[in-house]
Amino acid sequence: MKPEGVEGYGVSCDHRAGARVAPDATGAARTGVRHPDPAGGDPGGSDPVGGDPGTSPPDNLPRTLVVLFALACGSAVANVYFAQPLLVTMGRDLAMSPALVGAVVTLTQVGYGVGLLLLVPLGDVVARRRLVVTQLLLLVVALVAVATARTAPVLLAGMAAMGLLAVVAQTLVAFAASLAGPARRGGVVGLVTSGIVIGILLARTASGLLADLVGWRSVYLASALVTVLLALLLHRTLPRPTHAPTRLRYGQLVRSTLTLFATEPLLRLRALLGLLIFAAFSALWSSVALPLSEAPYTLSHTAIGAFGLVGAVGALAATAAGRLNDRGLSRWTSGIGLALLTASWLPLAFTRDSLWALAVGVVVLDLAVQAVHVTNQTLVHELRPDAGSRLIAGYMLFYSIGSATGALAATSLYAVAGWGAVCVLGAGISGAALLLWAAATARTSRASAGTAANPTPARTRDGRKAR
């Protein structure tokens, strides 16, 4: 058990029965703070996977299972991105208009956003093992529907359903975090998250290569087969719940996902940081193909997709960032990560002159984004383990908003002002995130200094000052 006040340690017990320790807005711990359930439940409610959320859960998560979590997360989220290099081929095969072709990506992303709000919170009221396996099997149905679609409406409906069900990746993140003990939680979240990021980065490359070999439909059939195998493995290996889930009606559950933002300042800060870092991440990856496909490079789609492999190197830093969080260094992991994110746009600005500069910038940017993202998810989950799925869902809603905004802004700006303007945009977004973190850190430091100078007198149970 980590002592009270250790930076980055989210939930523990102090010397009073029922009291809990939660991180402040920067991730440093603060003491004596109670968090009532915004939906009216007991703040000490049951964790869906067992254990009192106010105490350290038993660490019953072997590394092989963590790797399986990462593989399942990467496989699930990759489905959202497979279509991007296949749009022209899909449109030609199904005689779709350009507007309908564009709707393929839009509906998939919309489905993912809806799933974050409506499906991921179910992990707090339904046994997560059953929820994960059910979602994966339904995802198989959606993938087969896409692979066998003969008309545009069937394809679009399948894409929307696929996006909706791909949020099982976030259910798995919350599940893994709840199974890991506090001493390992950051590292576990880091490894699982690295699976998601690698899935995102490699999805376009893998789908392009497979489509070139045996057609675009094979991409979704292959994914359906992999998903079936993962569902069977997870059904056999995931632990069964030992405690009853939190008792909330579905309407209360969804509302509490949103009202948690009103009661948890750390969630508000970390969600806003998540929005900004993924706006910067999306600004790069949605537009970098444009200068690479033009002179002087005129690279092929396969060569451009290979830069996803370069980005995956940076994504592997997620596990290291998680371990730093476990050592109580979450505040500085965030600060250094945000500083690196801002600095990464300097080599990226020289992309037209050097592919090596692009490679360096890509690795640094992905490393920085994953360091901050893993820190965010670890700290957010630790606020309320009994509401872990809702907290992850709320945070990831901001991630989705940031990703969509960054992509739209970068591609629009490139059309009118070129790659240099995109780099200025990315640096500006990254710098704003760094300033936000610095302001929150300074505010927390002042508050801590004030508390140390004027400690609050201890009180007895009836509220009188202790003598």
Image: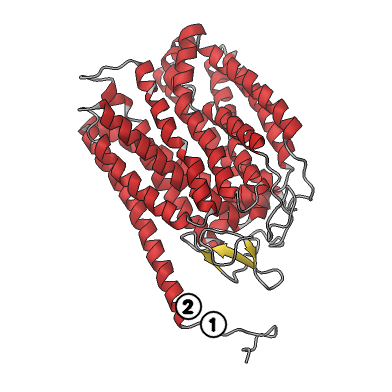
Tag 1–tag 2 contact (CB < 8 Å) = yes
The secondary structure type at the circle numbered 1 is loop
Q: Position of residue 388 (x, y in %)?
A: 62, 50
Marker disc for residue 143 = none
Classify residue 158 by image quadrant.
top right
* Above or below 351: residue 17: below
Residue 374 in sight here: no
In the image, 315 versus 381, the foreground residue is 315
Classify residue 150 by image quadrant.
top right
Q: Position of residue 283 (x, y in %)?
A: 35, 36
* Above or below 3: residue 177: above
The secondary structure type at the circle numbered 2 is helix
Q: In the shown orientation, is residue 354 left or right of residue 388?
A: left
The residue type indicated by label 1 comes to Thr
In the image, 28 versus 144, the foreground residue is 28
Sequence order check, earlier mark of 1 and 2: 2
Q: In the shown orientation, is residue 39 left or right of residue 214?
A: right
Total numbered labels: 2
Alpha carbon distance from label 1 to label 2: 7 Å
Residue 13 in sight here: yes
Q: Quadrant of the N terminus?
A: bottom right
In the image, 385 versus 319, the foreground residue is 319
Q: Position of residue 27 (x, y in %)?
A: 49, 59
The residue type indicated by label 2 comes to Thr
Q: Quadrant of the C terminus?
A: bottom right
Q: Residue at x 27, y 28 (%)?
A: 356
Marker disc for residue 451 = 2
Q: Which residue is mark 1?
A: 456
* Above or below 260: residue 171: above
Q: Residue at x 70, y 68 (%)?
A: 18
